Amino acid sequence: MNLDQTTIVIRPRTAWEAMDLGFLLAVKWFGRLWRLWLVTGLATGGPGLLISLKYPRLGLLIIWWLKSLHEPLLLYWLSRAVFGECLPCSTVAVKWRQLVLPNLLHSLGWYRFFPERSFFLPVHLLEGGDKASQKKRNQVLGKNQSGALWLTGFCFAVEIIICFSLILLAFLFIPESVRLAVDYQAPFAFPVFYVACYLAAVSIVTPFYVAGGFMLYLSRRVELEAWDIEIGFKKMAEKALKRRGNDDS
């Protein structure tokens, strides 16, 4: 981790400022993040859509439950891009086994229901360590922090809004006669379409969720480890060396 190569300004930020910065980065790199989402999104969304042909609610539940599997690849790419290394999507995609599988049971177990997982995912994925050290690290980072809770609630609300917006748009542009014919000849079509709209909403929101959580994590580390002061001292030292070099010449 080279603090001199960051593509963001290292300074203390409030939780809201950190989330806002994360959203801006998600907008900036949305195309690459979305393509990375497709790596796991198609693998998990495809079976969910197939199951929804007969059991729409079960298909929807599967897509929702497997959302946490989409996040490691996006976080890994972001963790490199923020520090000046924009990896090709293919380079990250081939790492999906080592990024997703080691924490598979953890991601789909109780941790899946943890509302602050976007904030703590960097600890598990980037810092590593055993479970005990990760737990202690989470306690230190998460003390008196509620930004990740707001982030999760906000992103969930946006997912629902996007999902219903897509459904309403489709109903506005599809003639009623066509809707009735489809409903009569293929009654499974509309439930599958609803699930597909939710999957599309997840694909749109996930880059913002991961980026927002990562910026909350970095902001907390800046606060605890005084990265901004370290960078300030380095710049002062560089200026002093330059002045000394000019004086010697």
Image (cartoon, rainbow, N blue to C red):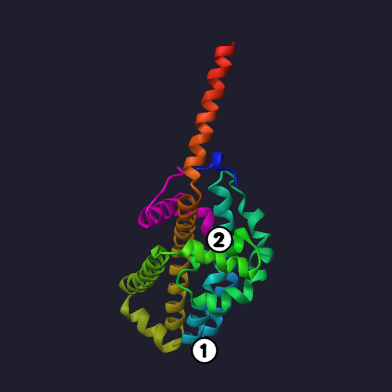
Q: Label 2's element? A: helix
Q: Position of residue 222 (x, y in %)?
A: 48, 50
Q: Is residue 211 magenta?
A: no
Magenta stretch?
8-34
Name the residue rendered at 47%, 60% in the picture.
213
Q: Residues within 10 Å of mark 2 (few under 14, many from 20)?
A: many
Is the Cβ of the residue at disc 1 closer than 8 Å to that at disc 2? no
Q: Position of residue 138 (x, y in %)?
A: 53, 65
Query: Which residue is at the front of the view, 23 or 233?
Result: 233
Name the residue rendered at 55%, 60% in the picture.
122
Q: Residues within 10 Å of mark 1 (few under 14, many from 20)?
A: few
Q: Which residue is mark 1?
A: 54
Is residue 131 visible to the viewer in this orientation of the structure?
yes
Q: Within the image, what quadrant is residue 92 found in?
A: bottom right
Q: Position of residue 80 (x, y in %)?
A: 58, 50
Q: Amino acid at mark 1?
A: Lys
Q: Within the image, what quadrant is residue 23 found in?
A: bottom left
Query: Which residue is at the front of the view, 8 or 246?
Result: 246
Q: How many marks?
A: 2
Q: Position of residue 156 (x, y in %)?
A: 39, 71
Q: Which residue is mark 2?
A: 122
Name the residue rendered at 61%, 54% in the picture.
89
Name the residue rendered at 57%, 69% in the picture.
135
Depicted 48 relative to depicted 137: above or below: below
**Main SS type for the magenta part?**
helix
